[in-house]
């Protein structure tokens, strides 16, 4: 009986995992999809599966959705967290997963990271809450969402620029996007505009902490007219 229950659970598990990994509400990159799949496979199907068979967590999430709750026991509910966490995940994977590879960086990847990591919670969330309070349906305000997300992306482009060229005395923090191999707007634009030799300079120096490498990257940005 126990083996039959486990078999049924694993059968359902593979279906649910596939649905999650191909959820159209989030644009997974290949790396992030593989990352999530490894995390799920590591945590869910092992052991006696008692927690996996429990309906308690499902009922809590269902309750959040039913009453449009933004929190669960003082923590952001799962349906809210889903918009921000994947963006952070893609950002981390882009410079932590395996060998540093600038060829994976692009404007589309930068936009994807910013859209989920910054634009939703920093810009759209406050507007969405203001609409929900008087009972508005968010599906009727998709154009507003699109405009606000663009504002969030523009904000992050400015932040990426200031990370390299901003005044430390004004910002109060040192920029480290170059040293930390971040998928910033400056580096993806540099990759887009650079010739073969300039790309070689980026590949050899981006993501290194020594001042000489950082200076070479900044000099290249200037040559490409990225410094205003």
Image: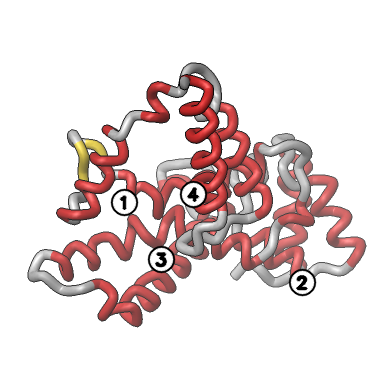
Decide: few, some or many residues near mark 2? Use Cα within 10 Å; few <14, some 14-19, many ≥20. Answer: some
Q: Which of the two labelled residues, at mark 3 and mark 1, occupies the earlier sequence position?
A: 1
155 left or right of 176?
left
The quadrant holding residue 118 is bottom left
Circle 2: element type: helix
Q: Which of the two labelled residues, at mark 2 and mark 4, occupies the earlier sequence position?
A: 4
Label disc, if present, on residue 152 of the rendered structure: 3
Residue 200 drawn above or below residue 96: below
- Residue drawn at (74%, 36%), measured in percent from left and top? 98
213 left or right of 16?
right
Q: Which of the two labelled residues, at mark 4 and mark 3, occupies the earlier sequence position?
A: 4
- Alpha-carbon span between mark 2 and mark 3: 24 Å
- Alpha-carbon span between mark 4 and mark 1: 11 Å
Q: Which of the two labelled residues, at mark 4 and mark 1, occupies the earlier sequence position?
A: 1
- Alpha-carbon span between mark 3 and mark 1: 17 Å
Decide: few, some or many residues near mark 4? Use Cα within 10 Å; few <14, some 14-19, many ≥20. Answer: many
Task: Nearest to the eye among marks 2 and 3: give it.
Answer: 3
- Residue that badge 1 annotates: 80
Label disc, if present, on residue 86 of the rendered structure: 4
Quarter of the picture containing the C terminus is bottom right
Residue contact between numbered discs 2 and 4, judged by CB atoms under 8 Å: no
Q: Position of residue 36 (x, y in %)?
A: 57, 41
Label disc, if present, on residue 193 of the rendered structure: 2
- Residue drawn at (35%, 47%), measured in percent from left and top? 81
213 left or right of 94?
right
**Residue 114 in view:** no
Viewer-proximal residue, 44 or 147?
Answer: 44
């Amino acid at each position: 009986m126990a083996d039959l229950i486990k078999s049924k659970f694993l059968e359902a598990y593979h279906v649910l995992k596939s649905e999650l990994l191909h959820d159209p509400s989030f644009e997974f990159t290949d790396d992030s999809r593989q990352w999530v799949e490894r995390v799920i496979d590591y945590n869910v199907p092992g052991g006696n599966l008692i927690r996996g068979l429990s309906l308690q967590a499902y009922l809590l999430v269902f309750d959040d959705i039913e009453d449009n709750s933004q929190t669960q026991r003082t923590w952001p509910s799962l349906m809210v967290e889903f918009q921000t966490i994947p963006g952070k995940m893609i950002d981390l994977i882009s410079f932590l997963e395996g060998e540093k590879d600038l060829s994976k960086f692009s404007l589309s990847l930068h936009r994807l990271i910013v859209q989920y990591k910054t634009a939703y919670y920093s810009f759209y969330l406050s507007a969405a809450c203001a609409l929900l309070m008087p009972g508005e349906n968010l599906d009727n305000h998709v154009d507003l969402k699109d405009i606000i997300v663009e504002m969030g992306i523009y904000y992050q482009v400015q932040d990426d620029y200031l990370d390299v060229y901003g005044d430390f005395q004004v910002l109060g923090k040192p920029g480290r996007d170059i040293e930390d191999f971040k998928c910033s707007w400056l580096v993806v634009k540099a990759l887009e505009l650079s010739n073969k030799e300039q790309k070689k300079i980026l590949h050899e120096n981006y993501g290194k902490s020594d001042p000489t490498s950082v200076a070479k990257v900044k000099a290249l940005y200037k040559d490409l007219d990225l410094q205003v």
